[in-house]
Amino acid sequence: MHYVHSGLLQRALCENVAAMLYLDHAATTVVRPEVRDAMAPYLEDAFGNPSGIHGVSRRAKNAIEEARERAADLLGASQPLEIVFTGGGTEADNLAVVGAAIAGGGRRRIVTTPIEHEAVLESARFAEKLGCELVVVGVDHEGRVDPAVVAAACDDASIVSVMAANNETGAVQPIAEVADLVHARGGSVIHTDAVQAFISEEVSVAATGADMISIAGHKLGGPKGAGLLYVRTGINLEPVLHGGGQELGRRSGTHNVAGIVGLVSAMEASAADRDAFRRRVGGARDRFEDVLRAELGDVVLTIGEPRLVQHSHLRIPGVASETFLIRLDQAGVAAAAGSACQSGAIDKSHVLEAMGASDQVAAESVRFTFGWVNDVVDGEQAAKRVAAVAREVR
Amino acid sequence: MRALVAMSGGVDSSVAAALMLEQGHEVTGVTLKQWQGADGSMPTSGCCTVADAEDARRVAAQLDVPYYVLDHVADFRERVVEPFGAAYVAGRTPNPCIDCNRRVRFRTLLERTEALGCDFLVTGHYARVREDAGRYRLLRGKDPSKDQSYVLHMLGQPELARVKLPIGEFTKPEVRAEAERLGLRTAAKPDSQDICFVKDDYRKFLRENFTDVAVPGHLVDTGGRVLGEHSGTVDFTIGQRKGLGVALGEPRYVVDIQPATATVVIGKKADLESTGCVLEETSFVAGDTPAAGSQLDVKVRYRAEPVPAVISPTPEGVSIRFLTPQLAVAPGQAAVLYSGDEVVGGGTIADVMRVKAPADGNS
């Protein structure tokens, strides 16, 4: 089936093709045309390796350093070298958690939460194998972190990692308060995974208060395989990738020049569009939920506010998510549930488990996520199609 | 019509999917994820591995049909893997593939067939279904060396009405030729013989996953004399000749396993003979138990030749008397009844009538 993106892009580009309603923008989203254009030269004649002395290299080197300055400006970093380019969000999380935990500064503890992305949780478990102590603090039934609980656990912690917003439910976390309380105790650095949040929430050094911030390009309309870690000056990180010493030794490996340029272009486009995104895409999500409720009556949203405006995490009682998602796929609607394992089967979500959800609730929960291409018309159309499938399944 | 095709990633189910498509059906491919290790990983050998699911996915992509992996790990663990271990603890020789087909696989797949809006289920088994005036018959596959009707004997009328087995109409070389003709990537893929949830050695798997399977005890002869020691009844199956750990000059076999005392009885070939067996968990394709005194052919192992036997119904199932004594009939295995090429039904061997009663381990 040919996937077509609804809303702006569909109407602009794909009017003649049978429409597929793509409602899995949190998994990954459509590359923005201006991002693709910005990347194109670095896949063509500006192909150079930035680590060289000749003109071809200089052009590539200039591109990544310019991108670094722009990313630093966007995040409010104090200097461009606080930006470390990585091969995506997972790698940024690995560098932050493992890098800070091993560097340690005499402290052995890692504090995090059970709703973090696996990139943080598994990195923390890896550091635990290397001798660090792992403390995972609880969350409430909406999967929200209590800043006081985090702060109480952070004595002797080298790193505290709390995500800015959850990728499954969309729960926005009080990261600024967490950062304040943790900093008040002194001695720990705070990392936030802002991969899912960046497109719709203000993410900056000032807004989050974090010492390290992970961002990924492909969630923002940029390319896959490109991300960055903001690292506040003075933080000592042990590298996790070893080699040629790029990124001041913090991330070895030849720079993904086109990817880096695309990442930063996507960050800029997202930041410029953010207020409009909240109205337009949030409007699509709200209309989706209103119409779905009107059509089906019985629709249970997983969490209340504050949540990401693009996320609709819900269940329709009596409708098992596995069957529902396949029937939706057959009907041309792409949605998600929990997290897919390597085989593609749906595993019980560790996030819902941490929230204390029953097995049945977890097995009925589905995630619809809207993206930068959507508007309110899509929300209504999506709800009607989803409701029709739900009625068939129920 | 809409076909749900159970795809294992092997050549047979790949061809089944492609044939359904050629016949004009709308195909959806599924793989049941049945097992994962403690760390969430899937096995790397056997019939439901990561690589196999990947092959199934690639074939589905080549055929341009939707494909999904469905999770039934919990159900499979409870109804297949746990009883597999329990059977060994009880000194039996289970057939987990049959337990899976009987208790999990077809029920799950037929439920999904309906839930996903499909009209029928297709698998890649070597067996045939025939409709005869509204009744369904289950026949051996065309290829005698690949016939899998044994593992499908539990299918009854409601199941057979909704199951298609296109591969049963072919021999294995014909299936491979079809796969070649269709350009399927699995055309030359070797057949899988393993138990899907066991990585290499099932005895190692049992020791790692069950606590009571490896109780050490005596090896005794049929007179009760102790011949030696063993490190767990799990290492033995009825009829086993190799690896007994005792040298006796002439061929000796495991003739009995007595879990209560962890005793393994060693005897001569003649000590393995039995005159009949009793079946439990029986089912019959037509729905009715055959009349007392019916003479049918019975297959007591997947690889055994069918032999003539007389059937008499019992309250728990059926009792079977072989016309000539049979060797190494093992409790836990399935016995399947045939009338010529047609499957009548079958069940699990609960008890075996020996020509000579084995020694009691306490003597």
Image (cartoon, coloured by chain):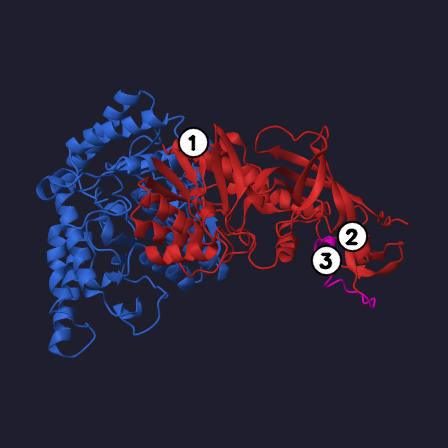
Q: Which residue is mark 1?
A: A361
Observer-nearest of B332 and B136: B136
Q: Position of residue A215 (x, y in %)?
A: 26, 53
Question: What's the distance in space between the residues labelled 1 and 2, CA to CA?
Answer: 54 Å
B86 left or right of A296?
right
Verify whether residue B234 appears in magenta: yes
Residue mark closest to the camera, 1 vs 2 = 2
Question: What chain letter is assigned to the residue under label 2?
Answer: B
Sequence order check, earlier mark of 2 and 3: 3
Question: What chain letter is assigned to the residue under label 1?
Answer: A
| Amino acid tagged 1 | Val
Image quarter in which the N terminus of chain B is found: top left
**Chain (red):** B
Question: What's the distance in space between the residues labelled 1 and 3, CA to CA?
Answer: 49 Å
**Magenta span covers which residues?**
B232-250
Q: What label does residue B240 carry, if any?
A: 3
| Same-chain status of marks 1 and 3 | no
Q: Position of residue B15 (x, y in %)?
A: 39, 50
| Same-chain status of marks 2 and 3 | yes
Q: Which residue is mark 2?
A: B272
Residue mark closest to the camera, 1 vs 3 = 3
- Circles 1 and 2: CB atoms closer than 8 Å: no
> Is any part of residue A357 visible from this angle?
no
**Chain (blue):** A
Circle 3 crowding by C-alpha within 10 Å: few under 14, some 14–19, many from 20: some
> Is any part of residue B344 visible from this angle?
yes
